[in-house]
Image (cartoon, helix red, strand yellow):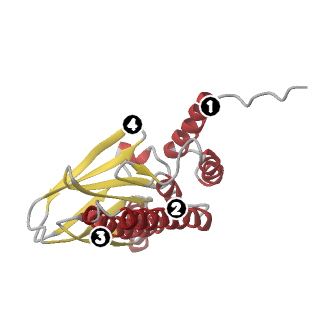
């Protein structure tokens, strides 16, 4: 009888652990966040699906997204993108796979520019992308200030424009290397579509081959991912709109 009870207990623990491993946990500490509300959304091909919200407790929060959640269940084991909101203008995006426990620290004044994260490969890589963009934005703002101070000085403005173009080129090189260094990671999509102030570092038309290569890589790793399928569809739409190559006269 005791052996039977032990087997039942072990089975229950095994089932419970199995469910836990397929859940996603996102927790953290928002400095100066007080007790304000924080919301969690799943980013899908159709937009945002808000799946949970809670009030910070002295800055602390904890989301446990069960594998039984229909939105999570249907996404198999591919990385999912989540977005945390303190307000419509203050949020951060991250990625997690089932079974991962992400831990985030950030400052309430600006989540994206101040956060640090651990617990998932995609999540950490996205933080690297956000950190690099923050550096780019900071340097761009400095150059803009110098430009504004020298509106009447053609030589100074020309020098600022050259420095800005070098900054753009340098960040573009960083993104190209990031994509090359992480061919099997979903974060490469975020690198390709990264932008600032309506400026995209990659052009979906001129750099279509880069996106096609990312699709080829991701199709091998996550063939059923809705993100991958959406990107493949984007490539198809772009190709259908591109003018045909002029035929060579014979």
The reply to whether residue 66 is visible in this rendering is no
Q: Nearer the viewer, mark 1 or mark 4?
A: 1
Q: Is residue 162 above or below residue 211?
A: below
Disc on the earlier residue, 3 or 4: 4
Disc 2 on helix, strand or loop? helix
**In which quadrant is the C terminus drawn?**
top right
The CA span between labels 1 and 3 is 40 Å
Q: Earlier in the sequence, mark 1 or mark 3?
A: 3
Identify residue for label 2: 172
> Residue 178, labelled with which disc?
none
Task: Specify few, some or many for label 1: CA neighbours under 10 Å numbering under 14, 14-19, or 20 or more.
Answer: few
Instruction: Looking at the image, tell me whether mark 2 or mark 1 is earlier in sequence order.
Output: 2
Q: Provide the residue designation for mark 3.
A: 115
The reply to whether callout 1 and callout 4 are in contact (CB within 8 Å) is no
Q: Are marks 2 and 1 in contact (CB under 8 Å)?
A: no
Task: Tell me the CA gap for discs 2 and 3.
Answer: 23 Å
51 and 195: which is toward the camera: 195
Which is more foreground, mark 3 or mark 4?
Answer: 3
Q: Are marks 3 and 4 in contact (CB under 8 Å)?
A: no
Q: Judge by depth and name the residue closer to the eye, 192 or 8.
A: 192
> Which mark sits nearer the N-terminus, 2 or 4?
4
* Residue at 37% across, 63% down: 157
Q: Which residue is mark 1?
A: 242
Q: Earlier in the sequence, mark 2 or mark 3?
A: 3
Q: How many marks?
A: 4
Q: CA distance from mark 2 to mark 1?
A: 24 Å
Neighbours of disc 3 within 10 Å: few (<14), some (14-19), many (20+): some
Image spot of residue 197 (x, y percent) = 34, 52
């Amino acid at each position: 009888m005791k052996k039977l009870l032990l087997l039942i207990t072990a089975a229950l623990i095994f089932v419970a652990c199995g469910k836990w491993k397929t859940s996603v946990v996102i927790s953290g500490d928002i400095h100066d966040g007080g007790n304000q509300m924080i919301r969690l959304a799943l980013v899908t091909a159709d937009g945002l699906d808000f799946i949970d919200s809670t009030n910070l407790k002295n800055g602390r929060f904890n989301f446990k997204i069960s594998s039984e959640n229909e939105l999570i269940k249907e996404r198999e084991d591919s990385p999912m993108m989540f977005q945390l909101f303190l307000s419509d203008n203050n949020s951060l995006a991250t990625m997690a796979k089932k079974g991962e426990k992400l831990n985030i620290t950030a400052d309430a004044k600006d989540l994206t520019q101040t956060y640090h994260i651990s617990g998932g490969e995609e999540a950490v890589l996205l933080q690297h992308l956000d950190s690099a963009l923050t550096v780019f934005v900071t340097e761009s703002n400095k150059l803009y200030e110098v430009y504004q101070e020298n509106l009447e000085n053609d030589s100074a403005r020309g020098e600022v424009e050259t420095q800005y173009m070098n900054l753009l080129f340098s960040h573009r090189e960083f993104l190209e290397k990031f994509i090359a260094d992480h061919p099997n990671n979903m974060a490469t999509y975020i690198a390709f579509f990264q932008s600032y102030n309506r400026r995209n570092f990659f052009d979906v038309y001129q750099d279509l081959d880069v996106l096609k290569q990312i699709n080829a890589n991701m199709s091998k790793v996550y063939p059923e991912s809705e993100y991958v399928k959406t990107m493949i569809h984007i490539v198809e739409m772009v190709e259908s709109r591109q003018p045909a190559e002029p035929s060579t006269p014979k």
